[in-house]
Amino acid sequence: MVKDSKSDAFSEEKTQKSENKTKRAAQSKASKAGLLFPVPKINKRLQQSKWTDRIGGTASVCVAAICEYIAREIVEASGKTCADGGKHKRMTPRDVILAIRNDPDLNRVFAGHKVLTGDKLRNISEEITLDADKRYKNITSTKRLGGKD
């Protein structure tokens, strides 16, 4: 049987390629994109949200990247706020709120949001407060006055 020189060269090249290939460890989408936020959890939440029937493969990666960027900006700004105060080394919710309110871009993003642990809300009308708060106020005021328990 006569061997063709082209087929021999092709088979040798094929064996060299297979020897050079090594199995790579599986990488997650987050590690491929260089993110710390969990891409599969965000993908699951997007699918459960029922905003749309179909979600692209990179949509969850994009949302995770945006969330991570905003979180980094908030932590960086609140760290600067905490360091400027100089009184304490630990970030508090108040430092986070001050950082958001002092940064124009973050303030625009979080304009309609209230953080109850760090925001000091003033001049709140009674119509806005929760029913549970009203009941709590009634209970505490009757106990102080010596009313029924």
Image: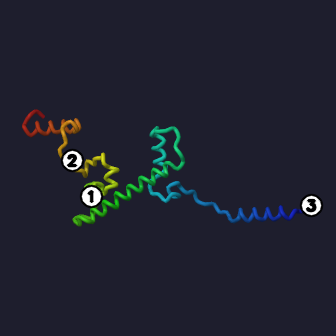
Quarter occupied by the N terminus: bottom right
Residue, disc 3:
1
Residue ID at (86%, 65%): 5
Please tell me how crowded label 3 is: few (under 14), some (14-19), or many (20+) other residues with Cα within 10 Å.
few
Q: Nearer the viewer, residue 18 or 34?
A: 34
Image coords of residue 116 (percent x, y): 26, 47
Q: Name the kind of residue labelled 2 in the image.
A: Leu
Looking at marks 1 and 3 on the same chain, the residue that comes earlier in the sequence is marked by 3
Residue ID at (53%, 55%): 28
Image coords of residue 76 (percent x, y): 34, 61
Looking at marks 3 and 2 on the same chain, the residue that comes earlier in the sequence is marked by 3
Q: CA distance from mark 1 to mark 2?
A: 15 Å
User: Do the CB atoms of the residues marked 3 and 2 lie less than 8 Å apart?
Assistant: no
Q: Secondary structure at mark 1?
A: helix
- Horizontal relation, residue 99 to residue 62: left or right: left
- Horizontal relation, residue 149 to residue 62: left or right: left
Residue ID at (45%, 57%): 36
Residue 120 lies, with reference to residue 135, above or below; the image says below
Image coords of residue 31 (percent x, y): 51, 58
Q: Name the kind of residue labelled 3 in the image.
A: Met
Q: CA distance from mark 3 to mark 2?
A: 92 Å
Residue, disc 1:
95
Q: Secondary structure at mark 3?
A: loop
Residue, disc 2:
121
Q: CA distance from mark 1 to mark 3?
A: 83 Å
How has the structure been colored for display? rainbow
- Horizontal relation, residue 94 to residue 143: left or right: right
Residue 70 falls in which quadrant of the image? bottom left
Q: Name the kind of residue labelled 1 in the image.
A: Asp
